[in-house]
Amino acid sequence: MEDLIRVIVFEDNRDLREGMTFLLQATPGLTLAGAFSDCRDLPTQIPALQPDVVLMDIDMPGITGIEATPLLKALRPACQVLMLTVFEDEDKIFQAIRNGASGYLLKRTPPGEIIKAIFDVHRGGSPMTASVARKVLHFFQEPAKTAPNDYQLSARELDILKGLVKGFSYKLIADEFFISVDTVRSHIRHIYDKLQVNSKTEAVLKAIREKLVLE
């Protein structure tokens, strides 16, 4: 008999969380290891509960699902993170994937497909809602630059741009570099000017596409 797949749900909407709890508990082959409204206790929950798959919401109090994903992967690298969210804008999709998510589903996904995706991601797949997969394909189909452009970004601006790519909030970036949120905003305005973009989404996608913030 195969081992049960241990699943944790992070979802701040109580009705949705309870619905997912019922669905998981009723599915053969899965066991619900935990269901939580936020990720604030994640550093103790993950080692204690040893999940195989995590269903991760994005918009939660305290720390977003995108911010929590690399922390979770550091604690348990073998765990697969499946984003389950209402957001389908490109910046969140690419930040989640870059931070270690293995799949990305929208909450309108039928329950049966969510269950199928859990088994799929556990077997090494990368399930995505069709509209999300199309955005990912479109991104990689665009012509790539042969070499990174030199936009004259300072070392600090590159650090802040890297934080944006990782999905960090302005406050997290400020805390990381011991500067104020206003200073972060000032740097970001300069980054936008130098990259000739008008939004965080455009800046993040340009940074990824042109490999401006290589690890």
Image (cartoon, helix red, strand yellow):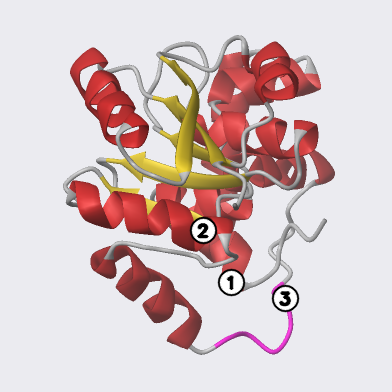
> In this figure, which residue is indicated by the disc labeled 2?
121
Residue 212 or 130: which is nearer the viewer?
130
The residue that appears at 26% across and 19% down in the rendered structure is: 18
Q: Residue at x 61, y 54 (%)?
A: 98
Q: Secondary structure at mark 3?
A: loop
- The residue to which callout 3 is attached is 148
Q: Amino acid at mark 3?
A: Pro
* C-alpha distance separating marks 3 and 2: 33 Å
Determine the CA span between mark 2 and mark 1. 26 Å
| In contact (CB < 8 Å): disc 3 and disc 2 | no
Q: Nearer the viewer, mark 3 or mark 2?
A: 2
34 lies left or right of 116: right
- Counting residues from the start of the chain, the first of labels 3 and 1 encountered is 3
Q: Are marks 2 and 1 in contact (CB under 8 Å)?
A: no
- Density class for disc 3 (Cα within 10 Å; few <14, some 14-19, many ≥20) is few
Q: Say what secondary structure mark 2 lies in.
A: helix
Dominant secondary structure, magenta: loop
CA distance for labels 3 and 1: 9 Å
Asked if residue 18 is among those painted magenta in the image, a careful observer would answer no
Q: Residues within 10 Å of mark 1 (few under 14, many from 20)?
A: some
Task: Magenta stretch: give its range.
Answer: 144-149
Q: Which residue is mark 1?
A: 209
Based on the displayed image, in which of its 4 quarters is residue 188 positioned?
Answer: top right
Q: Give amino acid for label 1.
A: Arg
